[in-house]
Amino acid sequence: MADAVLKTKKIGKSFDTNKGIKKVLDDISIDVDEHEFVCIMGPSGCGKSTLIRIMEGIESPDTGQVLLENVPLPKRPEKSIQKNFGIVFQLDNLLEWKTVYKNTDLPLAAFHMKDKMNSQKRVMEMLQLVGLWDFKDCYPKELSGGMKQRAAIARAMVTDPKILMLDQPFGALDAITRRMLNVELLRIWNETKKTCVMITNNVEEAMYLGQRVIVLSKSPAKIVEEIKIPFSYEEKTGDVTENKEYLSIRGKLQGLIRSLD
Amino acid sequence: MEKSKISRRIAPWIVLIVIILLWQWICTAFHVSEHLIPKPTAIAAALHDKFALSIWPDALVSIRVMLIGYVIAVPIGFVIAAIASQFKFIVRMVLPILILLMVTPMATLVPEFKLFLGVDPSLKIIIVILQVAPVVAVNTLTGFTYVPQKKLDVMRGFGCGRWETFFRVTVPNAMPQIFTGLKLGSILCTIAAMSADLSVGQGGLGYRISNSAAVSATDTAFAAIVVAAIIGVLFYSLIAIIEKKVSVWN
């Protein structure tokens, strides 16, 4: 069996709050295989974001470790490690003083990859991929929420990272825009076959995008259930929502989420 | 739309003209002594007569002090803010002192400085620096200290270190506060230079004002005040224009 590209091993994390020490993550072990799309769900405030921040090297765990291609992440991973992650944050995390083009170019500059990757061509390809090339000279405040997140995806992918890490990227968008971006993200995943880890609070989104959905409990978060979503790209983009199996998985997942809240 | 834009442009000038006319009329109607408050026409005449001879040379002395002082003070303020911002305990240490320095009218310390330096020609520049650097530092430091965590996370995601994060995110993020400091600095710079002229002497518009008032040439004093005010406004406007050019994203 192929080794997982990204693994967490018994991760635990606590925070100091004014009500004392609060444990948010308890013994979380996840294996993410190459080319896999994994979605993580859980009640709000359960520590999903903390988990993905630890997995992408922005925070470090108190106990346990994260293994990237079987190498443990250090406490403050350096650029050569972070290069492997393309990170899409929650809404509104473009740098507002840079144009869409400059925002997309930023990772190439930060990782000193501008020459190696032929930055102009690369940025153009990415912005065309997300349909934003015509808006390359706009500043973030001139964009709608959906466009901002497209730009954020272009920024995350520009360095051709091994793994895309998405923390509730469409959580603040309206339902129609969210659906459109889901369709685009699945298309991009199908074309590039990048490994994806995504936090979401939406059952349809998790089932549409994920091949596997991991459900976390209320804080301190533990893994409650792992559910496989056994549908191909063609099925998902077709009429899978009328499929009996799909409906039963959705019912199960929805019940599970409701019982945790 | 066009029309309201024009009227908005004109409105403040109309107010200014009305004030000047009222001033002129009051002085004439109530026979106010020229030595107490000169008429606007008298001020204009004094400005015309004395400009080339004394006001402009004195203005040049003041402008030189202001510019040299400002150019030295701004980087000092930046460096203090940059270093302090990286260490929380330093912020807490230096901020009260910077605020204390910011509100102290430095010209009042001239007699003290004279004890050490004598009547040194650079004394005025030192006063301007002491007045401007703290206000630049305080405002810049405020901007450097409050950076949204999510912006810092972007840099962490790239594995960037302290100073790369500082230059890529902290500085541009603080542009509004930096320019607040630069604009307040330009105002205090004008005030400090004029008051330094008053207490140090040796030429300058402030010196011209006090000297003219002392010999009851009130019209010349007022003419010099007008020039000082215009210099201050132009200086402030220059910084404001630069801000617009730099912060295009706002």
Image (cartoon, coloured by chain):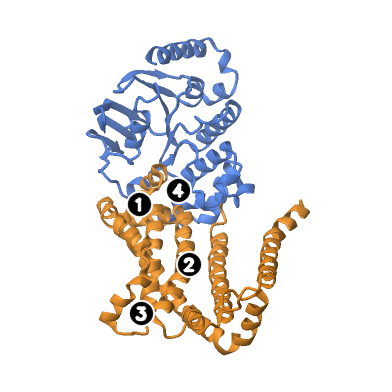
Chain colours: A blue, B orange
Q: Which mark is residue B160?
A: 1
Local secondary structure at mark 1: loop
Seen from the viewer's position, the closer of residues A118 and B95 is B95
Please, what is the three-letter code of the amino acid marked with disc 3? Answer: Leu
Residue denoted by label 2: B186
Work out whether mark 3 precedes mark 2 in sequence or the reverse, and give the earlier one: 3
Q: For this view, does B3 lie left or right of residue A107?
A: right
Residue denoted by label 4: A159
Q: Is residue A10 visible?
A: no
- In the orientation shown, which residue stands out farthest toward the bottom? B53
- In the orientation shown, which residue stands out farthest toward the right? B3
Q: CA distance from mark 1 to mark 4?
A: 15 Å
Q: Position of residue A61 (x, y in %)?
A: 26, 35
Find residue A129 and report its image quarter.
top right
Q: Is residue B152 visible?
A: yes
> Which residue is pictured at 27% across the width and 41% down the height?
A73
Which marked residue is nearer to the observer: mark 4 or mark 3? 3
Local secondary structure at mark 4: loop
Chain of the residue that carries numbered disc 1 in the rendered image? B
Q: Which mark is residue B123?
A: 3
Q: Is residue B35 above or below residue A129?
A: below
Q: Is residue B193 above or below residue A185?
A: below
Q: Position of residue A77 (x, y in %)?
A: 29, 46
Q: Is residue A42 above or below residue A136?
A: above
Please, what is the three-letter code of the amino acid marked with disc 4? Answer: Thr
Q: For this view, does A21 lie left or right of residue A88?
A: left
Work out whether mark 2 precedes mark 1 in sequence or the reverse, and give the earlier one: 1
